[in-house]
Image (cartoon, rainbow, N blue to C red):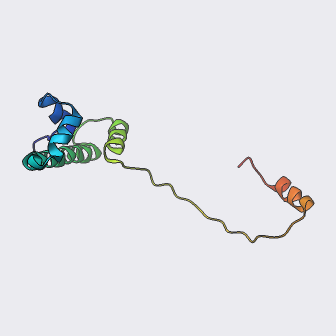
Amino acid sequence: MSLGKSEVQVAAALQMSKAELRRAIDSNEGLELKKAIEFGKTLHEAYFEDLYQSATTRDIPVKEILLKAYMQNKFGWNEKNETTVVQTEIQALTQEELDAQIAALDLNK
């Protein structure tokens, strides 16, 4: 499979800035260029997904933590944190009752 190139790599190969490439793509005349760039991005993403899959099956040696960090950054992957919601009944308490409940809490969990 072809590796594909990122937008930055294409701009560098064409000896232009990323902003100049973006303007060329966004212009009315840039339809073919836009298609080529989008296809290159698809190949680029597919290459890294293949690399990630190969790394997870141990087909190729790679530092998993570095690959994971790169993939998270490159494709916006996030860890999903679980949260627990505890609902309590709201009571009208005096200041002394509040102080006593606060003192009873174990804040060093």
Residue 4 lies left or right of residue 86; in this view the side is: left
- Residue at 37%, 38% in the rendered image: 65
Horizontal and vertical percent position of residue 45:
21, 46
Horizontal and vertical percent position of residue 33:
10, 45
- Residue at 37%, 49% in the rendered image: 77
Q: Using the image as rendered, state which of residue 65 and residue 80 is in the foreground.
A: 80
- Residue at 26%, 45% in the rendered image: 52
Whether residue 108 is visible: yes
Horizontal and vertical percent position of residue 61:
26, 35
Residue 105 lies left or right of residue 29; in this view the side is: right
Q: Using the image as rendered, state which of residue 95 and residue 58 is in the foreground.
A: 95
The answer to whether 96 is drawn above or below residue 29 in the figure is: below
Q: In which quarter of the image is residue 10?
A: top left
Please tell me how many numbered marks the rendered image carries.
Answer: 0
Whether residue 6 is visible: no
Which quadrant is the N terminus positioned in?
top left
The answer to whether 83 is drawn above or below residue 18 in the figure is: below
Horizontal and vertical percent position of residue 105:
79, 55
Q: Residue furthest right?
A: 96
Residue 77 lies left or right of residue 54; in this view the side is: right
- Residue at 35%, 42% in the rendered image: 73
Q: Using the image as rendered, state which of residue 78 and residue 15 is in the foreground.
A: 15
Q: Which residue lies furthest to the top in this view?
A: 15
Q: Quadrant of residue 22?
A: top left
